[in-house]
Amino acid sequence: MKKTCRLMTIGLMLLLISGCMGMKEQAEGSQQVVKEEKGPLQTKEIQQKKETAVIETKTWMKQKEPVELPILMYHSISSGNSLRVPKSEFASHMKWLKDNDYVTLSPEEAYRVFTTNSMPSKKSVLITFDDGYTDNYTKAFPILKQYGMKATIFMIEQSIGRPNHLTDEQMDEMMAHGISIESHTIHHLELNRLSKQQQEDELKGSKTFFDQRFSQRTRMVSYPVGRYNEETLKLAKEAGYQMAVTTEPGHAKKEQGMMSLHRVRISPGLSPESFGRLVEGK
């Protein structure tokens, strides 16, 4: 009898232990499901914001003359060389745009500008950053968010998460607040030095990556170091991009070609007044 009781007690204990382990595994499994769903939910929210932005363009005004759009070109928001603009200067530039009633555009809106020759305001601008440095998030993003401005970052696919470059989490947060992530190719190679196949791999491969990563239609590419040739223009269009930007100076015009739009280089040392003259094309 005692032996039977002991066996029953041991059996009950084993059942209890097994049940607890099963509940733990079930709980962990539930947590894992929630974690896996987090990314797609964020992407869906970003996509909804983009769709809303496109709908708002119905109020735009048709322009009589061919549109000239200032596409501003920044790189790092720091100090050290001609590609780095200090935070204080960047802040003064954005304040000038705000004080002078400029409307900042997304890539979708910029495409509409050129294809319909209409604008939400004659004072419209597209703000861009090349390379995707960390300071775009730590220094530029708070200022852009403060003024409610849109901007576009041309990100190098292979630089994501590397030292001094944007992480996935940072890009997700920025995209939820009006910042667009577009292509700066996979490896940031000078395209005019590559074979046709290599160029195609860089252009098409990065577009596919960003399309899938953000569940978006990646519309723009910035040619690394501004280098390109006639083959590049053809391949960029075939890859599915709607626009491409260069480092050629000046305001962007449709007549330049949608795959070779010019930009306004913003160098360090510009006062708000000098910056304003560049934006206005004076």
Image (cartoon, rainbow, N blue to C red):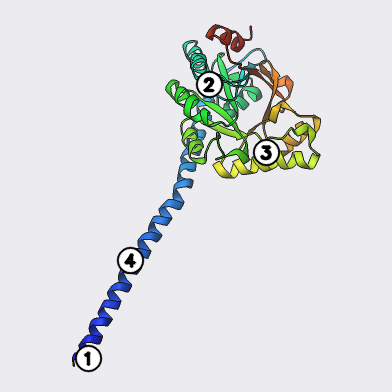
Cα separation between marks 1 and 3: 73 Å
Cα separation between marks 4 and 3: 47 Å
Residue to which mark 4 is pinned: 23
Residue 55, can we see it? no
Above or below 229: residue 37: below
- Left or right: residue 178 versus residue 208 is left
SS class, disc 3: loop
Among all residues in the image, which is located at the extreme left? 1
Between disc 1 and disc 3, the foreground one is 1
Sequence-wise, which precedes: disc 1 or disc 4? 1
Q: Amino acid at mark 2?
A: Thr
Residue to which mark 2 is pinned: 104
Residues under numbered marks 3 and 2 in contact, where contact means CB atoms less than 8 Å apart:
no
Residues under numbered marks 4 and 3 in contact, where contact means CB atoms less than 8 Å apart:
no
- Left or right: residue 14 versus residue 112 is left
Residue to which mark 1 is pinned: 3
